[in-house]
Amino acid sequence: MSMGMIDELRALFQPESIAVIGASSTPGKWGHMMVDRPIQSGFRGPIYPINPEKKVILGLKAYPNVLEVPDPIDLAIVTIPAAKVPDAMRECVKKGIKAAVLISAGFAETGPKGRALQEEVLKIARQGGIRFMGPNGMGIWASSVRLNTAFWFTPKTGGISFVSQSGTMGGYLLETANNKGYGFNNFLSVGNQADLSMADYVEYLGEDERTKVIVLYIEGLKDGPRFLRKAREVIRKKPIIVYKAGRTENGSRATMSHTASISGADELFEAVCRQSGIMRTYDVIHAFDVAEALAKQPLPRGNRIAIVSAGGGHCVVTTDACSGFGLDVPELDEETVRQLEQQLLPHAPPPKNPIDLAADPRPMSVANIVKILAENPTIDAIITAAPVTIRSTDPAFVRELLDAAEILSEIPKKYGKPLIATAMRGNMQGIAFELMRERQIPFYEFPEEAARAMYGLYRYSQVQDVRA
């Protein structure tokens, strides 16, 4: 990637100061939210509200325009009506602002008149050296500087960067994933992509060390060949997961009125994904289940999975789910079975894989069993029930629980094999759970989620092997 592109997008992803053009003191208005949200998320820089009629907004000194701000500004957040955006962009050029986020709607998505207005804004920005996101977007989350303009809450920090053409849908998806405990490095609601395109964001995020996985919600590609070229380059270093909207004829028509995107033939997009190594999901939330594992775990050497669960039914369902994704659940050799039997309760069934714990309440049983499986050369990865519930306040039990969590957390690093944990949503809390999450162990509530995540790890390992 050229140094010019790195410099241009740094002001968007890592601004040291922001101006909110169209700032408002009225709660509920976009101009109010664009000031309030960065304050609440702890943005690590000055915020300059721009409003010609106000002196103070949310306790911050307001200015009539960006030219009156005495200090440098890296990023402009624009919330004013579309017709006023060209003049605001001209002032940003004079101020020397390098990047902008155009929240304002009323551009190409509305028809020819709006498209002409969008082209005018683009021309001003290009001539003035400003790169911008949007218009018709919902904002940004940049964890590196704690900048949040997109959400009423502050997202959890993590290794997933999510780029979405839809603001409302993107926000809904991130909030759902955030509630499941997944962490995000960036969120970008890119709207019409008048200037910066999906290819630009993929290129930048491919070089960003804090981004471990890139997730894209796409309605239509602006420059398909360039996107494919950049995706191929980035996939050598990190995975890209895509959910493509507008797969049907009616859905394709809807994208045109939403973000002025031409969806194109779905068969062609499917071919693009296969050629480039992009992982495509067909349920919007599935992308984040897979991304969570890819952001935290090593890649398996093969598709041979060991399953450890607290009960027989869970074992069966998890095995079926793995098999449905083409993962193998191989029967273990006699020596390994013998070792595992020594760790199980007497009434437990033979541990041939999957391994049924038969409701064993001892946390260390799980840790010892998983350790034996991790040492087995015929097993490439493990899905295990996680001992995280404090069933007793007895100090000895709590100590055993934490010791087991420690041992399990070290498995991926020590043996180079991915470990995915399952637990009921109500049990995903407490000190042992937090310990494992902090040590990068992904948790899933349902067997299908865990199996899908493991498949994502295996699929990307295959992509890497092909490109090796």
Image (cartoon, rainbow, N blue to C red):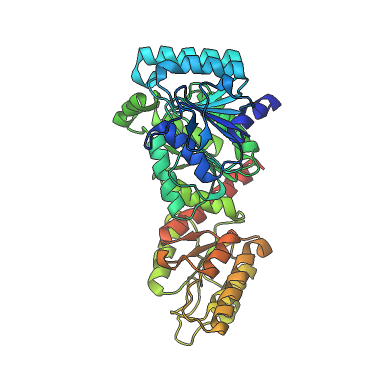
Residue at 64% x, 69% y: name it. 375
Q: Nearer the viewer, residue 393 or 163?
A: 393
Q: How many marks?
A: 0
Q: Residue furthest left?
A: 250
Residue at 63% x, 20% y: name it. 96
Q: Is residue 143 above or below residue 443?
A: above
Instruction: Name the quadrant containing residue 322.
Output: bottom left
Residue at 62% x, 70% y: name it. 406
Q: Residue furthest right?
A: 3
Residue at 66% x, 61% y: name it. 413
Instruction: Name the quadrant containing residue 298.
Output: bottom right
Q: Position of residue 135 (x, y in %)?
A: 45, 24
Q: Position of residue 374 (x, y in %)?
A: 61, 68
Q: Position of residue 177 (x, y in %)?
A: 44, 50
Q: Nearer the viewer, residue 427 or 250?
A: 427
Please indicate whether residue 369 sits to the left or right of residue 315 in the image. right
Q: Position of residue 364 (x, y in %)?
A: 57, 78
Q: Is residue 220 above or below residue 108?
A: below
Instruction: Name the quadrant containing residue 239.
Output: top right
Q: Do we see residue 143 in this rendering? A: yes
Q: Residue furthest bottom?
A: 346
Q: Do we see residue 418 in this rendering? A: no
Q: Nearer the viewer, residue 421 or 151?
A: 151
> Which image quadrant: the C terminus?
top right
> Which image quadrant: the N terminus?
top right
